[in-house]
Amino acid sequence: MKILTIADVVVPILYGDFDAGRFADIDLVLGCGDLPPEYLAFLANTLEVPLYYVRGNHDLRFETSPPDGCLDLHGRLTRFNDLKILGLEGSRWYNGGPQQYHENQMAAMIRRLRFTLWRAGAPDIIITHAPPRHIHDEEDLCHRGFKAYIRLIKKYRPRYFIHGHIHREFADSDERITTLEGTQIINAYGYHVIEI
């Protein structure tokens, strides 16, 4: 199974200069925020695969113009084939805008999911906008990760934790992936393909 992960910037080979052959074998798309709804809808419709997403701190039009054919995964656990996928939107609070949360608010959101996770079992993949604290994050208030995500990873040990929000160019896959207790933490900035 091949999963296309996307975040933060519209990539020309996935939109204006779409290369169908390069992405013909994608089974699922996971959006990690700060992307136009038209971009998400285009990918879901063009690739003819499910697209699950979480909103980032700059996703302001989704209330009035949600992406057609896509599923907002915030606060939900869903299944795709044999995979259980959990989503959490937003970034750390920095100016009071939408999809911004204090650390205690994110921890409370995760606590509210405990029964769901107990009943369904641990997620295989978690998608978020912000990263875990001290993994791929920055020190400015907006780009700090959540400590609650570290606890989430340690408790449920998903195979993958995929986030956006941190804008970096990558020379190779090794620079965008960090492993914590068996979980691959992946920065999806631009795009990245995971093969399971």
Image (spheres, rainbow, N blue to C red):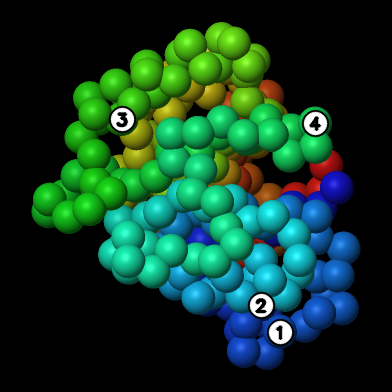
Residue 44 position by quadrant: bottom right
Indicate the amino acid at tag 4.
Asp
Q: Which residue is drawn at 30% across and 30% down?
A: 106
The amino acid at mark 2 is: Leu
Give the Cα separation between the discs numbered 1 and 4. Answer: 29 Å
Q: Are marks 3 and 4 in contact (CB under 8 Å)?
A: no
Residue at the image position 22 percent from the left and 25 percent from the top: 104
Q: In which quarter of the image is residue 119?
A: top right
Whole-number angstrom distance, CA of label 3 to CA of label 4: 27 Å
The answer to whether marks 1 and 3 mark residues whose Cβ atoms lie closer than 8 Å is no
For image coordinates 66% across by 77% down, the residue present is: 14
Disc 1 to disc 3, C-alpha distance: 36 Å
Local packing at callout 2 (Cα closer than 10 Å; few below 14, some 14-19, many 20+) is some
Distance in Å between CA atoms under marks 4 and 2: 27 Å
Q: In this view, does 156 lie above or below 10?
A: above
Residue on which disc 4 sits = 82
The amino acid type found where label 3 is placed reads Met
- Which residue in the protein does label 2 denote? 14
Residue bearing the label numbered 1: 18
Taking depth in this image into account, of 78 and 22 the one nearest to the observer is 78
- Spatial CA span between label 2 and label 3: 31 Å
